[in-house]
Amino acid sequence: MSNKIKIGIVGYGNLGKGAIEAIKQTQDMELVAIFTRRDPKDLNLNVPNVKTVHISEAIDYKNEIDVMLLCGGSAKDLPEQTPYFASMFNTVDSFDTHAKIPEFYQSVNEVATKNNTTAIISVGWDPGLFSVNRVMADAILPNGENYTFWGKGLSQGHSDAVRRVNGVKNGVQYTIPAEDAIEKVRSGANPELKTAEKHARVCYIVAEEGADKAAIENEIKTMPNYFADYNTDVNFISEEELNQDHTKAPHGGFVIRGGDTGAGNKQIFEFSLKLDSNPEFTASVLVAYARAAYRLNNEKQFGAKTVYDVAPGYISPRSAEELRRDFL
Amino acid sequence: MSNKIKIGIVGYGNLGKGAIEAIKQTQDMELVAIFTRRDPKDLNLNVPNVKTVHISEAIDYKNEIDVMLLCGGSAKDLPEQTPYFASMFNTVDSFDTHAKIPEFYQSVNEVATKNNTTAIISVGWDPGLFSVNRVMADAILPNGENYTFWGKGLSQGHSDAVRRVNGVKNGVQYTIPAEDAIEKVRSGANPELKTAEKHARVCYIVAEEGADKAAIENEIKTMPNYFADYNTDVNFISEEELNQDHTKAPHGGFVIRGGDTGAGNKQIFEFSLKLDSNPEFTASVLVAYARAAYRLNNEKQFGAKTVYDVAPGYISPRSAEELRRDFL
């Protein structure tokens, strides 16, 4: 048996695949098994020494896995899966339905506390790293204002919306943070900004042959909730272009706080990410926090935790001595 | 008696003055006293209900102060003061002599562990917030490279050096991060960069009347260690201009990590600060971490700690419930 932290992954979508890649980059973790609701034989997993197991058999792995990475979706999977798995395993998940976090926390905390497991919820970059920066900036500069911008990033919901428009064969939508809004915030002016002023929307559309492009453009730009309030740009491209330039899932964004200290000195705090692959980065954050779940559980810190409960040293594979010597 | 966290400040220089201002912005802290090596009467402190006390009488305040903010310098003050005060109080300091952190940690840890106090060392922005970001970025993107840039910022050591040049009446020096180097790093190229390639130096000089400006410029630009290896810009200005435009202490900088995930997807992680007042911001960080020192001590987490040992929630005045609901 190795001394490595033994990891299981639940779910073999983009996030689960990203987690496989992220674990490969670590020295202190090993992947034991992927758990799936599908027939495990259908996964065609090509990773040596990693099993594919039906999700119903997870309980048999209770003593073989230190931390379970829950890579399902927030809408349907995690509200059921996190409490279920937290009854048997330490877990890390990326639950990101902001409004439902308090009740999700309660349900997970109850199970984890009862079963002496540690469940770190809502890990990733937002919620996750962005959340950490919003709180640290707020604590350090009480007299100020937080701003979060998202993008440039592919939005799944908005891409689905444009694809439903009559005459659209295929298409994608990017959310773009508005440069002028960012510059205003960076100046320390703490402006009042509506969401629509903070972001623009850019669509790349493949039209059906003979479709009325002006009508498509108009329908998209006037679509309530999704586009009507935004500065929206619609570009028509060929299917080849779409397949060549728009198959990745880039994302990112900014957390900026402008605050005053003393007699009006402006202090600007900024955190940003520019990601070629949103799911691979999110998975990398989950994997780092799996280390923290393992260590917190060894210290008998049971129950549901968030990124606010995790000291930075706990996510690092390096020793405290090395961190003080080489990184402080 | 209020429920507020009771704070003492040791040292009444720029950092100590910044701490007074930062405490004013909190709701959960109160400043009890300033401790000084000078005659306390000479401080001319104009803050209601705050005492000025000679440093030798600090022991009398053992039961009246929860956390002592040590606002002295790293060269001579803190190596003596932190172990001394950590024998009686919880402390936070900004020790920033990177090479000596391991031995400083040892000496403080010994005293604090023995006396059941909690001493958070090397707090501020670098070391401090930059250190947190270097470690989190390294943990999340193991296959990458960290870069730290400083500036635009006033450098005290380099300003002293230009003022020693023959014919210079007064002057200041700013360290400027090189835009082209930052752009290279932001592109994810992970370039090899010498310190001199990462930063430029800009001097604003008031020359003595009749001084040979070309000779001054040449002497500065060829000064070994300080300027010779750098792209250095020398500007001559009037004394009025110096007093008007160059009396603040701005600073800031960037921590950037470019890393690869999966099959070569670039992921860029960036943290930056743009500060009108370096000492006021540093003091604001110290004050936030005083909250953590107080809480860790209540949990009997004794000994020396660094920012790596402090979960983000511990520096926030807000409850865990509020953080999960409004910030996550």
Image (cartoon, coloured by chain):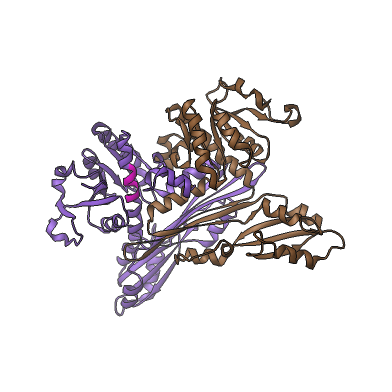
Chain colours: A purple, B brown
Q: Who is closer to the viewer here, B159 or A157?
A: B159
Q: Residue at 75%, 27% (x, y): give it.
A: B41
Please tell me whether residue A138 belongs to the stretch shown in magenta. Answer: no
Q: Is residue A156 above or below residue B81?
A: below
Tell me the residue at 42%/44% (across/down).
Answer: A312
Place of residue B312 in the rendered image (x, y in percent of width and height, measured from the top left): 45, 41
Residue A263 location, quadrant: top right
Q: Is residue B272 visible?
A: yes
Q: Quadrant of residue A253?
A: bottom left
Q: Is B228 left or right of B267, judged from the image as shown?
A: right
Question: Left of B230 or right of it: where is A315?
Answer: left
Side (left or right) of A41 relative to B232: left
Q: Is residue B37 above or below residue B179?
A: above
Q: Position of residue B141 (x, y in %)?
A: 38, 56
**Residue A73, horizontal then vertical, whole percent:** 27, 51
Q: Nearer the viewer, residue B178 or B270?
A: B178
- In this rendering, would B47 be left or right of A235? right
In the picture as drawn, the residue positioned furthest to the bottom comes out as: A210
Instruction: Tell me if residue B188 comes above or below residue B60 in the rendering.
Output: below
Q: How many marks?
A: 0
The question of residue A291 being in magenta is answered with yes
The answer to whether any part of residue B268 appears in the image is: no
- Say if B224 sits above or below B67 in the image: below
The x, y position of residue B98, in whole percent, is 54, 47
Q: Which residues are magenta?
A: A287-292
Seen at 64% across and 50% down, the residue is: B276
Dominant SS in magenta: helix
